[in-house]
Image: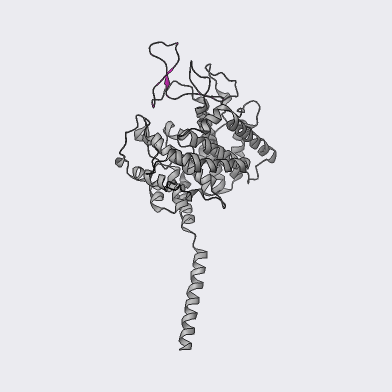
Amino acid sequence: MICSVAKHSILLLNVALLSVQLSAQTPAPSSTMASAAAKVLMPYVQKEASWAMEQLPVTVTASTSSRSSGGKHDFFSEGDYWWPNPKSADSPYIQRDGMTNPDNFIDHRKAMIRFSRVMGSLASAYLTSKKERYAAQAFKHARAWFIDTATLMNPHLLYAQAIKGRFTGRGIGIIDMIQMIEVAQALMVLEKSKSANPKDYMAYRSWFERYLNWVTQHKYGIDEMNALNNHGTCWTMQVAGFARFTQNDSLLDLCRQRYKTLHLPGQMATDGSFPKELARTKPYGYALFNLDAMVMLCKMLSDKQNNVWEFALEDKRSIRKGISFMHPFVEDKKKWTFKQDVMYWDNWPVAHPFLIFGAIALNDQGLFNTWKSLDHAPTEDEVIRNLPIRNPLIWIKE
């Protein structure tokens, strides 16, 4: 009897030891999913990096507009939905919500998007190959935007989303700066390269520190910070991204506080939807855009001490609920029960950040499968503009 018990105990011990060995050898599901995502992305990384290696730097100084009240180094853009008044060509522009005016000045916005694309592509290629040529090429662009006195951009958005005859710039123009989030992330990735110059990195961080001072203290920034829609979310998203790069823990804490006390309770309904976005003339696109931004807040603000992914209000509103609401409409767009967007309806959805980062953080294979099945390289300018996180690899493998 004693011998039988001993044999049974030894068997259980061996099973336990084998289980420990297997768990040590087998990656966690989220790690496996991250590896699978990297495999999906590799062809796109290689193609984009080849393109980026051929690009010369283009900054805000490459083009100007007579309608700008700023100087050569000042970012300038015009409000999307504002048009000439057909009754009087010389009068102030009038609004047509959801309808983009193709004649507005957007050269600086396009240059910033291109910069983000270049930096994200090269950082992704560097991560997967460790080849210094990718880092060296990226730094040529970074120096042009942040250091070279002939081509740099001033660290503010005083003249963004101006309206002819009404405003020389507006707080809501700060949303244009979300294109710099992946630039900051790329710089964090590339700082480990041999091509990284510590003196240059001091200048890069100084530029973003000055921008953070402006966007947190200027009236435009304060107005945008308190917006109860995607503009408020995007203020926090960009501040979080730049605070990570500049290692500003107090601003990161502020962003966590705003997510928990303003964005989630102020924007999400109990079913996980965003009513203010659904009320727009492009509800599908705006709902996707805001969810992507909310998910990026969870991604950037979570660390060993703060798991923002699991935060929930007393009534159970959380990022999980937001993802659960929107995912079925992305998986099958025909299920959408709200109005169709007045523009770009056929261009959505694509491989959204909320799908891949949600899949990895929440260990959700369904989200991963949907992400994998969608377009990873959209070409429509408006889609690209509203998809500021286009290089998942630099976030997955950070």
- The number of discs equals 0
The vertical placement of 395 against 4, above or below, is above
Q: Position of residue 217 (x, y in %)?
A: 60, 30
Image quadrant of residue 103?
A: top left
In the displayed orientation, state which residue is furthest to the front.
314
Left or right, 138 with respect to 13, comes to right
Q: Is residue 285 visible?
A: no
In the displayed orientation, state which residue is furthest to the right.
199
Q: Is residue 273 visible?
A: yes
Q: Nearer the viewer, residue 337 or 383?
A: 337
Q: Position of residue 99 (x, y in %)?
A: 38, 25
Q: Nearer the viewer, residue 386 or 167?
A: 167
Determine if the magenta segment contains residue 112: no
Image quadrant of residue 338?
A: top left
Q: Position of residue 318 (x, y in %)?
A: 44, 46
Q: Position of residue 151 (x, y in %)?
A: 62, 27
The vertical placement of 361 against 335, above or below, is below
User: Overall secondary structure of the magenta stretch?
Assistant: loop
The vertical placement of 92 against 384, above or below, is above
Tell me where the magenta segment starts and ends, as one range: 74-98
Determine if the magenta segment contains residue 88: yes
Q: What's the image's color scheme?
A: one colour
Q: Quadrant of the N terminus?
A: bottom left
